[in-house]
Image (cartoon, rainbow, N blue to C red):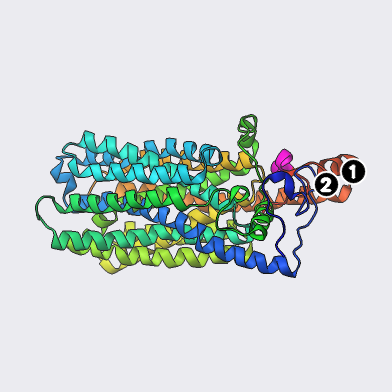
C-alpha cells in the first residue's frame, strides 16, 4: 500500500533527520524503499537529466556557432575588423556573467521551469535575429542578450545538485556537460552541410541559415521546458507516486540539501570566507579560458592545417567527439573514486602538454590536430569535476548557490578579456600562449586544494574525537545552519 502523499515539508519528519535534528543520523532504506529509489533514480535519469542536458546542448551549440559563422563568411559580411570581431565574441561573456547570478538566485523563487524555459526561448529569438545584423555593433548587442540568457541556464547545474547524491553527481554532470562537446560536433556537421549545400542560396547566406535553424530549434524547445520540466524535489506533483515524492525528499537531503531551503541574503557574504571557493574559482578560470578560446576559434585553427573553409567545419567534429567520450569517462571515474582534485590535476597536465605541442610544432598538421584533441579532452571533463567538487563540498544552499554564481561569473569575466588575445590570425599564437599559462597554473593549484582539504578533514576528525561539550552542541545543530563548518561534514579531496 502506498504511503500517504506528502503535501508539504512538515510531513517528512519521519523519513530522515529534521533540519534541526541530530545530523549524524544515517538514512537507511528498507527493501521496498530501495526498489522505489532505484525506480525513482531511473525516472530522474530519463526525465529531469535529458531535459536539462538538451538545454545545455542547445546553449553549447549556439556558443560555438559564432566560430562557424566566422568561417562561413559572417565577419566579412558585416565588415568587422579582427579587433571588432574579437569584441563580437567577447561581449557575449558580459551578458553571461550577469545572467549566471540571476539564474542561481531565482531558481527556487521563480521555479526552474520558468527560469530555464524562458531563457531558452529568449536566446532563441535573439539568435534568430542575428540573421539581420549588418554591422559589428548590432552583432555585439545581440550577443550580450544571448549571453545573458545562456548564463541564466547555468542554474541547471544547481538544479541537478538538488536531485542527485554526491556519489552520483559527477557522472550525471558529466553527461550534462558532455553534451557541449557533442553540440560542437553536431554544429560542425550542420555548418558543413549548410556551407556546402546552401552557399549563396537566396534569401540568405550560409551563416544566416546557420543562425536561423539553431534559433528556431531553441525557441521550440524552450516552450517544451516551460511545460514539462519538473520543479524542485519537494514540490513535484504530477507524474510521481507518493513513494517517489517521499524518496525524492530523502535523496535531496542525502545530497546535502535542506528541503524548502531558500536563499538567505545574510549568508551570501559569509560564503566568501572559505578558502576553497577561491581554489575552485581559479581552477574554473583556467578551464573556461582554454575552452572559450579553442571553441570560438577552432574552425579557424583547423583551417591553418591546409583545409578549405568547408573542410575545416567538418574537421572540428572529431575534436568534439574525443572531448565527449573523455568527459563521460573521467567524470565517471571521479564518482567511482569519490575524488576530484587528483583528476583535475591529471587532466590539466594532459591539456597543457597538448597546448605546448600546438605552440611549438609548426610543420606537422597531424601533430597539431592531435594536440588540439588533447587540450580539449583534458579541459572538457575538468569543468564538471571542478563544479562537482564545489557542489559536494558546500553544505549550505545559499553558500552553494553563491559559490556556483561567483566561480562562473569571475571565470567568464576573465574569459571576456582573455578572448581579446585571439586577434592575430591565422595561428593565434598570442591567445594560445595565454591559455597555456592559465592551464599550467591549474596543476599546482589542484595540488594545493588536495593538501588543504586533507588538512581541514584531519582537524575535523580531531575535533570529533575530542567530543567536547561544544562539539556535541554543534553536532545537534542543522547542516543548513552551520554549512560546511558542521563537525560531521567532511570534504572530498
Q: Quadrant of the N terminus?
A: bottom right
Is residue 111 visible in the rendered structure shown here?
A: yes
Q: Label 2 near label 1: C-beta < 8 Å?
A: yes
Report the Cα–Cα distance between label 1 and label 2: 8 Å
Q: Quadrant of the C terminus?
A: bottom right
Are there few (<14), some (14-19), or many (20+) residues within 10 Å of tag 2? Answer: some
Q: Quadrant of residue 75?
A: top left
Indicate which disc residue 91 carries.
Answer: none
In percent of width and height, residue 90 lies at 32, 40
Q: Main secondary structure of the magenta part?
A: helix
Element assignment for label 1: loop
> What residue lies at 55% left-to-right and 37% top-to-bottom?
109
In percent of width and height, residue 179 lies at 41, 59
Q: Of the residues under marks 1 and 2, which one precedes in the sequence?
A: 2
> What residue lies at 78% left-to-right and 46% top-to-bottom?
487
Magenta stretch in the rendered image: 480-485
The one of 462 and 471 positioned closer to us in this rendering: 471
In percent of width and height, residue 165 lies at 63, 57
> What residue lies at 51% left-to-right and 57% top-to-bottom?
48
The one of 472 and 454 positioned closer to us in this rendering: 472
The one of 344 and 246 positioned closer to us in this rendering: 246
The residue to which callout 2 is attached is 463
Element assignment for label 2: helix
> What residue lies at 74% left-to-right and 64% top-to-bottom?
29
- In this view, which residue lies farthest toward the top? 266
Identify whether 188 is placed above or below 451: below
The residue to which callout 1 is attached is 468
Amino acid at each position: 500500500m502506498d504511503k500517504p502523499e506528502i503535501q508539504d515539508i512538515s510531513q517528512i519528519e519521519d523519513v530522515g533527520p529534521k533540519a534541526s535534528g541530530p545530523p549524524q543520523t544515517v538514512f537507511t532504506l528498507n527493501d521496498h524503499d530501495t526498489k522505489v529509489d532505484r525506480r525513482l533514480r531511473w525516472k530522474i535519469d530519463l526525465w529531469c537529466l535529458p531535459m536539462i542536458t538538451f538545454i545545455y546542448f542547445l546553449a553549447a551549440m549556439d556558443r560555438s556557432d559564432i566560430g562557424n559563422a566566422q568561417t562561413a563568411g559572417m565577419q566579412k559580411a558585416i565588415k568587422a575588423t579582427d579587433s571588432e570581431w574579437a569584441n563580437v565574441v567577447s561581449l557575449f561573456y558580459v551578458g553571461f556573467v550577469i545572467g549566471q547570478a540571476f539564474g542561481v538566485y531565482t531558481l527556487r523563487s521563480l521555479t526552474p521551469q520558468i527560469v530555464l524555459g524562458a531563457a531558452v526561448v529568449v536566446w532563441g529569438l535573439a539568435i534568430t535575429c542575428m540573421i539581420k545584423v549588418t554591422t559589428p555593433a548590432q552583432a555585439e548587442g545581440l550577443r550580450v542578450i544571448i549571453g545573458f540568457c545562456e548564463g541564466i541556464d547555468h542554474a541547471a547545474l544547481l538544479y541537478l545538485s538538488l536531485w542527485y547524491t554526491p556519489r552520483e553527481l559527477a557522472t550525471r554532470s558529466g553527461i550534462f556537460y558532455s553534451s557541449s562537446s557533442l553540440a560542437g560536433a553536431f554544429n560542425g556537421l550542420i555548418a558543413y552541410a549548410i556551407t556546402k549545400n546552401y552557399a549563396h542560396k537566396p534569401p540568405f547566406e550560409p551563416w544566416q541559415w546557420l543562425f536561423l535553424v539553431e534559433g528556431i530549434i531553441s525557441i521550440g524547445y524552450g516552450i517544451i521546458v516551460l511545460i514539462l520540466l519538473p520543479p524542485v524535489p519537494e514540490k513535484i506533483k504530477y507524474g510521481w507516486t507518493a513513494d517517489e515524492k517521499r524518496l525524492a525528499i530523502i535523496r535531496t537531503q542525502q545530497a546535502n540539501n535542506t528541503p524548502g531551503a531558500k536563499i538567505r541574503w545574510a549568508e551570501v557574504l559569509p560564503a566568501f570566507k572559505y578558502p576553497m571557493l577561491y581554489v575552485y574559482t581559479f581552477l574554473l578560470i583556467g578551464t573556461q579560458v582554454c575552452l572559450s578560446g579553442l571553441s570560438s576559434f577552432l574552425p579557424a585553427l583547423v583551417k591553418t592545417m591546409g583545409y578549405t573553409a568547408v573542410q575545416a567545419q567538418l574537421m572540428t567534429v572529431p575534436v568534439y567527439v574525443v572531448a565527449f567520450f573523455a568527459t563521460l569517462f573521467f567524470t565517471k571515474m571521479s564518482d567511482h573514486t569519490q575524488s576530484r582534485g587528483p583528476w583535475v590535476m591529471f587532466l590539466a597536465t594532459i591539456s597543457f602538454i597538448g597546448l605546448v605541442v600546438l605552440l611549438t610544432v609548426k610543420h606537422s598538421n597531424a601533430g597539431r590536430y592531435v594536440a588540439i584533441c588533447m587540450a580539449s579532452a583534458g579541459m572538457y571533463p575538468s569543468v564538471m569535476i571542478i563544479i562537482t567538487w564545489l557542489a559536494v563540498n558546500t553544505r549550505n544552499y545559499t553558500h552553494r548557490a553563491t559559490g556556483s554564481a561567483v566561480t562562473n561569473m569571475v571565470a567568464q569575466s576573465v574569459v571576456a578579456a582573455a578572448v581579446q588575445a585571439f586577434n592575430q590570425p591565422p595561428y593565434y599564437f598570442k591567445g594560445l600562449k595565454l591559455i597555456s599559462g592559465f592551464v599550467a597554473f591549474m596543476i599546482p593549484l589542484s595540488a594545493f586544494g588536495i593538501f588543504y582539504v586533507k588538512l581541514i578533514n584531519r582537524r575535523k576528525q580531531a575535533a570529533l574525537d575530542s567530543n567536547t561539550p561544544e562539539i556535541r552542541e554543534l553536532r545537534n545543530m542543522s547542516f543548513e545552519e552551520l554549512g560546511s563548518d558542521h563537525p560531521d561534514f567532511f570534504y572530498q579531496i
